Image (tube, helix red, strand yellow):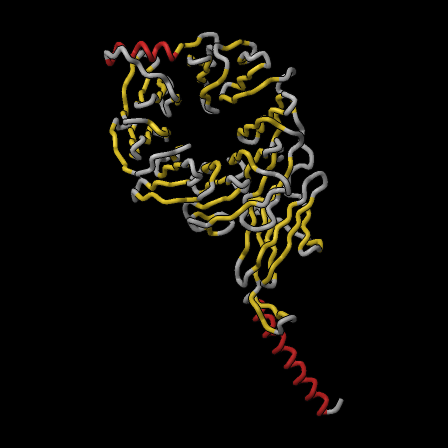
Amino acid sequence: MSTVLRRVLFYFFILIFLALGAYLLVTAQGLVFDFENLEFVRTGALFLKFNPSDASLLLNGEPKEISRGLVIPGVLITDLLPGAYHLALQKEGHETWEKNLDVRSGVVTAATHIELWPATSTLKEVLDNPISDFWITDRGAVVLHNDATLHFNDITLRGKEVAVSEESSGLIVTKEGKSYYLIDLGNPENAVNISLLFTSLQTSTFGSQKTESIQTLFLHPFSESKLLITTAKNLFALDMKRPRLEKLLTSSSTVSTAISDNEALLLDSEGTLLIFNLLLQTTSEHPLYITQGVKMTASPSGDTVFILKNNGELFTYDRSSRATSTLAENVGSYFLSPGEERIAIITNDGSLTISALKDYHSDLEILKGTTWDIALPKGEIPKSFFWLSDFPNHGLIMTARGTPLLVELDERTPHNTHTLDGKIKKMVPIGTTLYLLKSDGIFVETTLGE
């Protein structure tokens, strides 16, 4: 080999070494060469958590081999050029999940609440015979038979309908005509006539022969022996154990009432919000100048009060700043999330909107005031909505046609929806169990997820 050739090869290998070293140095910093744009760019990544965890992944329509983390459950896909990616997760016997995600330079884009719902639901009959209605308590289901009688297990209850019940309580209030009855499902044969006791205590406590009628009833938020009762002008606390009647609030005329975890709230006809603290036994007044309301609710913490007016305007009152603002218009109904960070709104024209009430972090950083619409299957109009505590990125909808829908609440599209089997009249989710009353009156339950 000649000296010239050796020299050429020597320099050639030096160039190869330098080029390879430079490339390795660049790639070690997360940079790759984008041949489409002829430039080095910093890559991004995708982090996915999904159930079932053995689903297969398609990335832009091509199968993608994935390796699952040992320390952190989930799948990390690295070295992706910045841009838009279409993801699809598939498993036999399940609905396909799809999403369009943007990968940014030097950023990990996350989707960590992915559910692939079983394609068909297993429905288990709760009762053999058809019923007209049901209510879920912490002791089981109270049902209304087709002969207009209420039953708990094999016991017939006093009353013709359930006026008040809570999923976390074994107490219910039933109603027949103008009479209300308190029933402890631990001893369901006995019923206390609330209406007679309330009338009697008004006369003996306040010395008035003109008694007020019950308008609404609430179970006391932290005392099982007490009820909160509203009339046309007053809010009372009725202690069923003593018995004793206490007047908490008085107004010129009551427009709406609500309770939080430790307060009772009353909006009067002059637009003043009266709040009674059930723990401290104190009263505060808040002039809101809102003189009409279809519905008033308070967040569990009591920090925010929501008032829906007859014209569809939804107002919020921030207790800390004492500021009132319009949250949305054309509202038919609204549903506050368990963590109080979001609210679902069904509009009068049949759309479903999610709005952020405060800054919070999910897969994305969501800022207060962010609003996005949820796309539903064509022809389906939402009638009612339920937040799912075990599936924070999903909601449950019953449509106007009686179709039960599981909907994904991610602001990124597409919004994956799953239609449960059959037409229904009523549904109640409790954890991962969903209770359904089918259109033919059959009472069934199913399990959400796997």
Q: Is residue 69 visible?
A: no
Is the residue 21 above or below the residue 223 in the image?
below
Front-most of 293 and 427? Answer: 293
Residue 234 x, y percent position in the rendering:
30, 23
Front-most of 226 and 382? Answer: 382
Is the residue 324 above or below the residue 447 in the image?
below
Q: Quadrant of residue 17?
A: bottom right
Q: Is residue 273 visible?
A: yes
Q: Residue at x 58, y 29 (%)?
A: 434
Q: Residue at x 48, y 18 (%)?
A: 162
Q: Quadrant of residue 312?
A: top left
Q: Residue at x 45, y 13 (%)?
A: 177
Front-most of 279 and 283? Answer: 283
Is the residue 223 above or below the residue 431 in the image?
above
Q: Is residue 154 left or right of residue 324?
A: right
Residue 232 x, y percent position in the rendering:
33, 22
Q: Residue at x 48, y 37 (%)?
A: 332
